[in-house]
Structure formats: structure tokens, C-alpha cells
Image (tube, coloured by chain):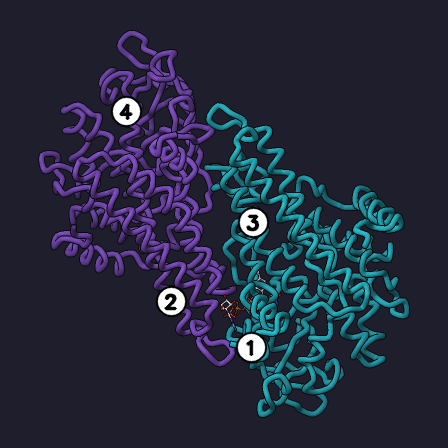
Chain colours: A cyan, B purple
């Protein structure tokens, strides 16, 4: 057993940190960036291009596709450092569409898409969920009907990234309504400016929007089918090998707890420094324990992946615990801020730039997104522990 | 023992429910979140007409002479629909403060008009650290001839932006113990306001007071006795907030159970999954706790019994329980509950504000520490 990183890995971590200090087009210590906010977007793209030049954007990709075939532990380190600084570096193209095309795409598809993805030229929006297919993703009903050289796609996708910058959507659609539900699904990519696509913004509880994308007889050329017809469910599920440790929860939380401790050391309430309050100290100490726990869970997933083991319950444990841990930390943060926690970010006296107030609303949503806590626990119990399905 | 409502209360509850369902639909609540003033005067006039504002004020001052417990029942219904506007701050912070501390003249001057819906009055106690204790009050009032000159600042003053008067707590000697209350026209020279944007989309102002000049008769209650009054008002305020939370939490539970029955995933209602059933059951446990603790505290106040313990317990429990209820409500709703268009998130955001109002759970737990003998 050896819990430390290799010397090489530590050097890599330092190199990433130095690179960010020098090249990041915003101040991560002061600014919170939302990659889907049009005003932040250009900065994110600028940085992604720098990462692309450095070779880090696609470091996880095999060498034949211009990647570095970086070991999982280095991907982990990279993701950890980015999440700590709140940098949305890796997008769905890099982490999902690219790898899917490598595994299942035709030569033509690889030639067309991979360079564009690795140079941060295409932005993707993920079209999986539908109004009636959330946790039960395989229940999706968006229909694609073959019509000559095209598919005609009709249906609606929801909760996608709402930004106007997305030029392509990757989606799961139903191509055989009579087959068992997992076996009639195909994986398509479509340009967002295709006729018949409308995007409606859905304002969320915090300063953020998702999208409702309606497709009405949208023509998608058959050459945009990735993988075999009706095998889309398995195409989508084939991403197991990409780093999916869930390190971002622990990593962003460790930044947040530092800020909270600092705030407590500078803020008086009731004639005393908050940092002298034994309850606050105790609660934050408890959170430090939870953050470390979440980190170890994430490390264990990356470690398994590094040995080519396939994590199943481990990834679900990391996601459920990590996302809920952040919610707990944010709740404590809100209590610490007292009445000032109510203030929105644009308020001049909002503590910590209103970050905690926003997270109070958005962090529980992260526990729902990408497989809710209930679904993760179902997986842990059934696939992981072998309990019978309910 | 009788833990149910009496006939008057049941009638009040029913008619309040009926009125609010039609007059305060979610579309109105949502519109008021971004409205400058935060309420519609037509609705304000209607509730004044049916005697709600004057519900618990004595008939001699134009009120209905009902009890605080009766008001609690009304506040539950208001919390249930997230009734926007200055009702709470004007009745509890304004009217009740005058009733408790004001002299006969002041009561005659202000309360009848307030009951008629013609006056909006805000209470300004908390300052920059927002803590409910005497030491946190730094605003100073100095006597100069027959005038009081007030300087300082106030934070998170409910609905001050639309108020006619603000009741200001200020130090009237060098001692932290000597605090007095003054009533000032909100538009006075010397009062400046900035409206905050808050998580609960309620209207709270930051107020700076500089050389505010007031006549002697703007002193409310006895000189240097302000804190005794504030403590009383805080107790009423805390229980009133519990009542709003009680109604809100019931609505969140009902709404979630309804959704769990309707939302189909994997070919069955999500409410058939035990994970969701347990979430709903846990919500029901918390809702029950809020309701009875709130009613108990309010009943004790109304009976004039010593109620410090019950008040602290009710606010400590409800503040946290309501947030737990909303958190689980969000979980059961999935992504849709986080959209601006959905009511679920409106309750969640208000649950945070309600926790902070009139002392958060931490504050009230400290009172309980004393009460249990520490
Ligand atoms: C912020 C955010 C961003 C998102 N981004 C995207 C995106 O880019 N692209 C995309 O395609 N989707 C996206 N999603 C959608 C996300 O994947 C779904 O919200 C998620 O799968 C849950 O689906 P749902 O919201 O429909 O809830 P439902 O599936 O309706 O679930 C409602 C409740 O029932 C529970 N439940 C459901 N089934 C079971 C069961 N079998 N056992 C126990 N409990 C169950 C759930 O856990 C939840 O508590 C995003 C969601 C959010 C909140």
C-alpha cells in the first residue's frame, strides 16, 4: 500500500498549478465562472484553447487521436486542480463525445469531429433527458424515423446546457419503438442550427438557465449516427473508462472550507470572532473529515480505473456522498454567514461574493443531476451489494 | 386537553384559505418577487377590509380583538401561499410594538389607521451583524434641547422601502442596557435606504441614519426600556414566523405527495419507490413537529403564560425542520423543482429567510441552554 502520489505526479500537479497562475484569463480567487453564461464563455474558450495547445485538454485520449494517453491518476490530478479553482476545463466533447466517436465512430466521423473537439472548436449540449424520461432515461421517446439518407427526428430534450454557444447536440433517440426499451435507442449528433430545432431557456432557481430543446422533423443525415442502429444505449454506456471519480466535489469543497475558515477568523458576531465559537469550529472540523472521506472515495475510483478495474458501486458511492457532502458544507456555510447569507451576489455587502448563497440553491441540484442520489443508492444496493431489485 | 381549533379559528382558517387561494395564486407571488414594492395595494385594501390587519388589536383601536393564537392560524394560511407584502412586518413589527410600548396618544394615532390599511410601519432593530442582542445596537440617540438626534445604521429592515414610519431602536446612554424606541416618518431627511436583493425575494433595506431629528413625542414607551419591548416583539415575531413555516411546510408536503403520485418513471409513480416514500414520511414527521410546537407556543402567549421555553423550542425546531422539508421536497421533484417556474423552489428560498428572521435556530438553542439549566 502507498497512499502518496509519485514524484512525477507531484511535479505534474505543480506544473498544472503554475500553468493556471500564468495562463488563466480570469482571477479564480475572486471570480466564479459559469461556462454556460455568455459573458463568461469567451474566457473559458480562450483557456481551453491554451489547454489544447499544451496538450492537456485531451490528455486522456489515446495518442493516435492526438491525446497523451495520460494515466488515470494524472487525469485525476488535473481534474482536482481545475475543480479546486472552479475552472470548467473539460467539456462534454472531450469527456463524452470524443471518446464515443473513437470507440464507435466511422473513419469519416473520426476525421471530421475529433480534431474539432480537441481544438475546442465545437461546443456540445447533451440531449439525453426528456420531460418524461429523467431517472428512467431508457424510457426516452424522442423519435427518429429513417427517411432516405436522413433521420427525421421529433421530440423534446430538456435540462441541456442552455448556452447559445453550443453548435452541436449529441442525443439518444428512439429508432425502434417495438423493441425492448434499451434496444430501440440510437446515438445521433446534430447541428443545433438545423431546421426544426428550437431552444427555450429555462431559468433556474439560482442565476443560471437550462434548456428545453424541441425537435420537429429535424433532418439528421445518417452519417451522423454514431455506432450501430438501435445500439445507442450501449454506446452511451461505454464511457466507463473515462475518469469519473467525482473528485470535483471534494476538491471544490476544500476550497470552500478554506474560505469559510478565513471568513470566521475575520468576522465578529456578538462581540466575538466567529472562529472562537466552539460550535462553528466543531461543525467545520466535521466537514473537514467529510471532505477527506469524499476525496478518498474519489481516489479509490481513479485508482481502480488506473488498474483497468471497472468501478461500479464505488463510483456511485463517490457521487452520492460527494454531492451530498457539498450540500452539507454549504448549509453550514449559510449558517455561519447568518443574515448576510440571504444576500445575492450583486449585493455590495454579500459575504464571499454571494458564492454560498448561490451554492445553497445549486448544490442540491447537483445531487439530482447525472443520476440522483436515490438512483445511486439503488445501484449501490443492487449492483454493488447484490440485494434484490425492489 | 384540546389540540384542535375552536369554531372561530376553524372559520377563520377556512375563509382565509378560500380568500388566499383566489387572491394570492402563485402567479401573483411570482410577479411580486420582481415587483419594486413587493405587493399589490388592491389586495392590501381587501385584507384590511376583512379585518385581517386589525385581527388581534383591541376594538378600541379599530381592531377585531382576537388573540395571537387566532393570528397564528391566519399566518399559517398566509405562509401556505407565501403571501407577499408587508402584513407581517406591519402587524408584528409596527402595530404590536406600538400596542406593547406606545402611550395612549400614540396608540390612538397609529393603530386605527394601521388596522384600516392606511399605514405601513417597519421595525428597525438589527444592525450590521444582525444579532438580536443589546450590545449589537450601536445607533445612538442624543437629546438636544427638546429634540432627539439619531445617528447610526440598520440592516435588513423588512419593507422599509414602502413604509410610512420606521420604529428605530437606539442607545440613549453610554450603557448598552439603555435602549429606546423612536418612531420616525420613513421619508425624513436623515434616513437613507438601499434595498437588498435577497434569497427569499423579500424586501429588506439597509438604512443609514444621519442627524435624524425627532420630536420628544416620537419616543415610544419609557426611555431606556426599549430592550424589554424588543424582547417581547421578538417572541411574537419568532412564533409568527413559525406559523408561516407551518403553513408553508404543509403545502410543500402536500405538493410533493401529489407529485410523487403523478410522476411516472420506470412505468410506475415515483411515490411507489420506498426511497421516495421515506422522504415523504420524513417530511410528514417534521411538518407535524412544526405544527404542534407552534400552536403550543402561540397558545401559551395568548393565555399570558410564561412561554419563553416553548417559543425558543418552536423556533429552533421549525427553522431547521422547514429547511429539511424543503430539501426533501426538492429531492422528490428532481430537476423540475429547481426551475424558476416551479413553486417548490419558492418555498425553499423562503425557508432560508424564515430561519433567519427573529433569531435563527442557533440563537434560540442558546436560550434553551439557559432554560435547561446551563
Ligand atoms: C442542474 C442540472 C443539470 C442537468 N444537465 C443535464 C444535461 O446537460 N443533459 C441532460 O440530458 N440532462 C441533464 N440533467 C437532467 C438529469 O439527468 C435529471 O434531472 C436526472 O436524471 C433526474 O431526472 P428527473 O429530474 O426527471 O427526476 P425524476 O426521474 O422524475 O425523479 C424524481 C424523484 O424520484 C426519484 N426516483 C426516480 N426513480 C427512482 C427509483 N427507481 N427509485 C428511487 N427513487 C427514484 C429521483 O431520485 C427523484 O428524487 C440535469 C439536471 C440538473 C438538475
Q: Nearer the viewer, mark 1 or mark 3?
A: 1
Give the camera-side residue of A226 and B331.
B331
Position of residue B201 in the picture relative to residue A285 (left or right): left
| Residue at image mark 4 | B228
Identify the chain of the residue marked 1, using the numbered disc in the image: A
Q: Are marks 4 and 2 in contact (CB under 8 Å)?
A: no
Q: Which mark is residue B257?
A: 2
Indicate the position of residue A390 as horizontal and vertical percent values.
51, 76
10 Å neighbourhood of mark 4: few (<14), some, or many (≥20)?
few
Position of residue B76 in the picture relative to residue A82 (left or right): left
Q: Nearer the viewer, mark 1 or mark 4?
A: 1
**From where the camera sits, is residue A352 visible?**
yes
Quarter containing the N terminus of chain A: bottom right
Relative vertical location of residue A382 with respect to residue A210 in this rendering, above or below: below
Identify the chain of the residue marked 4, using the numbered disc in the image: B
Indicate the position of residue B124 as horizontal and vertical percent values.
35, 30
Q: Which mark is residue A388?
A: 1
| Residue at image mark 3 | A359
Question: Which residue is at 58% across, 81% downward?
Answer: A142
- Whether callout 4 and callout 2 share a subunit is answered yes
Indicate the position of residue A227 as horizontal and vertical percent values.
75, 82
Cα separation, mark 3 vs mark 2, equals 26 Å
Relative vertical location of residue A162 with respect to residue B68 in this rendering, above or below: below
Amino acid at each position: 500500500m502507498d497512499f502518496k502520489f509519485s514524484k512525477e505526479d507531484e511535479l505534474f500537479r505543480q506544473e498544472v498549478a503554475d500553468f493556471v497562475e500564468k495562463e488563466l484569463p480570469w482571477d479564480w480567487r475572486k471570480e466564479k465562472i459559469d461556462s454556460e453564461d455568455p459573458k463568461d464563455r469567451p474566457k473559458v474558450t480562450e483557456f481551453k484553447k491554451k489547454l489544447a495547445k499544451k496538450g492537456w485538454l485531451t490528455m486522456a485520449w489515446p495518442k493516435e487521436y492526438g491525446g497523451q494517453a495520460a494515466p488515470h491518476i494524472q487525469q485525476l490530478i488535473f481534474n482536482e486542480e481545475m475543480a479546486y479553482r472552479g475552472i470548467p476545463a473539460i467539456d462534454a466533447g472531450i469527456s463524452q463525445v470524443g471518446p464515443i466517436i473513437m470507440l464507435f465512430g466511422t473513419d469519416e466521423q473520426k476525421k471530421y469531429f475529433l480534431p474539432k473537439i480537441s481544438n475546442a472548436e465545437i461546443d456540445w449540449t447533451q440531449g439525453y433527458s426528456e420531460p418524461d424520461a429523467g431517472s428512467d432515461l431508457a424510457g426516452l421517446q424522442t423519435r427518429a424515423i429513417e427517411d432516405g439518407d436522413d433521420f427525421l427526428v421529433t421530440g423534446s430534450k430538456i435540462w441541456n446546457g442552455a448556452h447559445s454557444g453550443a453548435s452541436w447536440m449529441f442525443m439518444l433517440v428512439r429508432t425502434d419503438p417495438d423493441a425492448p426499451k434499451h434496444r430501440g435507442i440510437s446515438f445521433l449528433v446534430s447541428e443545433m442550427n438545423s431546421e426544426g430545432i428550437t431552444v427555450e431557456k429555462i431559468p433556474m432557481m439560482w442565476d443560471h438557465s437550462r434548456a428545453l430543446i424541441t425537435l420537429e422533423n429535424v433532418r439528421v443525415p445518417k452519417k451522423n449516427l454514431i455506432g450501430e442502429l438501435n445500439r445507442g444505449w450501449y454506446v452511451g454506456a461505454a464511457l466507463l473508462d473515462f475518469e469519473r471519480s467525482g473528485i470535483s466535489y471534494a476538491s471544490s469543497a476544500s476550497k470552500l472550507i478554506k474560505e469559510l475558515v478565513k471568513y470566521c477568523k475575520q468576522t465578529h458576531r456578538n462581540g466575538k470572532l466567529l472562529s472562537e465559537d466552539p460550535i462553528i469550529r466543531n461543525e467545520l472540523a466535521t466537514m473537514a473529515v467529510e471532505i477527506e472521506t469524499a476525496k478518498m472515495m474519489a481516489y479509490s475510483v481513479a485508482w481502480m480505473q488506473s488498474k483497468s478495474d471497472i468501478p461500479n458501486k464505488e463510483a456511485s458511492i463517490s457521487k452520492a456522498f460527494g454531492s451530498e457532502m457539498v450540500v452539507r458544507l454549504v448549509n453550514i456555510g449559510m449558517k455561519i454567514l447568518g443574515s448576510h447569507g440571504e444576500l445575492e451576489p450583486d449585493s455590495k455587502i454579500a459575504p464571499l461574493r454571494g458564492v454560498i448563497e448561490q451554492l445553497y440553491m445549486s448544490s442540491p441540484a447537483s445531487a439530482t443531476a447525472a443520476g440522483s442520489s436515490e438512483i445511486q443508492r439503488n445501484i449501490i444496493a443492487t449492483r454493488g451489494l447484490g440485494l434484490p431489485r425492489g | 386537553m384540546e389540540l384542535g381549533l375552536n369554531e372561530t379559528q376553524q372559520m377563520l382558517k377556512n375563509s382565509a384559505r378560500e380568500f388566499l387561494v383566489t387572491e394570492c395564486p402563485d402567479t401573483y407571488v411570482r410577479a411580486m418577487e420582481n415587483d419594486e414594492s413587493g405587493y399589490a395595494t388592491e389586495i392590501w385594501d381587501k385584507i384590511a377590509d376583512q379585518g385581517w390587519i386589525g385581527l388581534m388589536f383591541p376594538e378600541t383601536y379599530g381592531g377585531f380583538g382576537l388573540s395571537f393564537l387566532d393570528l397564528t392560524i391566519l399566518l399559517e394560511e398566509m405562509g401556505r401561499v407565501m403571501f407577499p407584502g408587508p402584513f407581517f412586518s406591519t402587524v408584528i413589527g409596527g402595530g404590536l410594538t406600538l400596542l406593547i410600548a406606545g402611550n395612549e396618544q400614540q396608540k390612538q394615532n397609529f393603530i386605527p389607521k394601521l388596522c384600516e390599511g392606511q399605514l405601513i410601519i417597519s421595525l428597525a432593530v438589527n444592525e450590521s451583524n444582525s444579532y438580536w442582542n443589546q450590545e449589537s445596537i450601536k445607533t445612538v440617540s442624543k437629546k438636544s434641547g427638546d429634540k432627539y438626534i439619531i445617528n447610526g445604521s440598520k440592516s435588513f429592515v423588512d419593507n422599509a422601502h414602502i413604509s410610512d414610519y420606521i420604529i428605530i431602536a437606539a442607545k440613549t446612554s453610554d450603557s448598552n442596557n439603555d435602549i429606546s424606541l423612536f418612531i420616525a416618518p420613513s421619508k425624513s431627511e436623515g434616513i437613507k435606504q438601499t434595498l437588498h436583493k435577497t434569497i427569499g425575494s423579500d424586501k429588506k433595506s439597509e438604512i443609514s441614519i444621519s442627524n435624524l431629528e425627532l420630536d420628544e413625542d416620537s419616543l415610544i414607551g419609557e426611555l431606556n426600556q426599549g430592550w424589554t419591548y424588543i424582547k417581547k416583539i421578538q417572541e411574537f415575531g419568532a412564533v409568527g414566523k413559525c406559523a408561516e413555516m407551518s403553513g408553508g411546510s404543509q403545502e410543500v408536503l402536500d405538493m410533493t405527495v401529489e407529485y410523487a403520485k403523478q410522476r411516472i418513471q420506470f412505468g410506475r409513480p415515483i411515490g411507489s419507490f420506498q426511497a421516495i416514500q421515506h422522504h415523504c414520511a420524513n417530511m410528514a414527521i417534521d411538518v407535524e413537529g412544526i405544527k404542534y410546537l407552534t400552536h403550543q407556543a402561540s397558545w401559551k402567549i395568548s393565555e399570558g403564560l410564561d412561554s419563553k421555553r416553548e417559543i425558543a423550542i418552536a423556533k429552533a425546531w421549525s427553522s431547521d425542520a422547514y429547511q429539511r422539508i424543503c430539501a426533501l421536497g426538492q429531492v422528490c421533484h428532481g430537476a423540475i423543482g429547481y426551475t424558476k417556474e416551479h413553486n417548490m423552489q419558492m418555498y425553499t428560498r423562503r425557508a432560508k429567510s424564515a430561519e433567519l428572521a427573529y433569531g435563527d435556530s442557533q440563537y434560540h438553542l442558546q436560550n434553551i441552554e439557559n432554560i435547561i439549566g446551563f
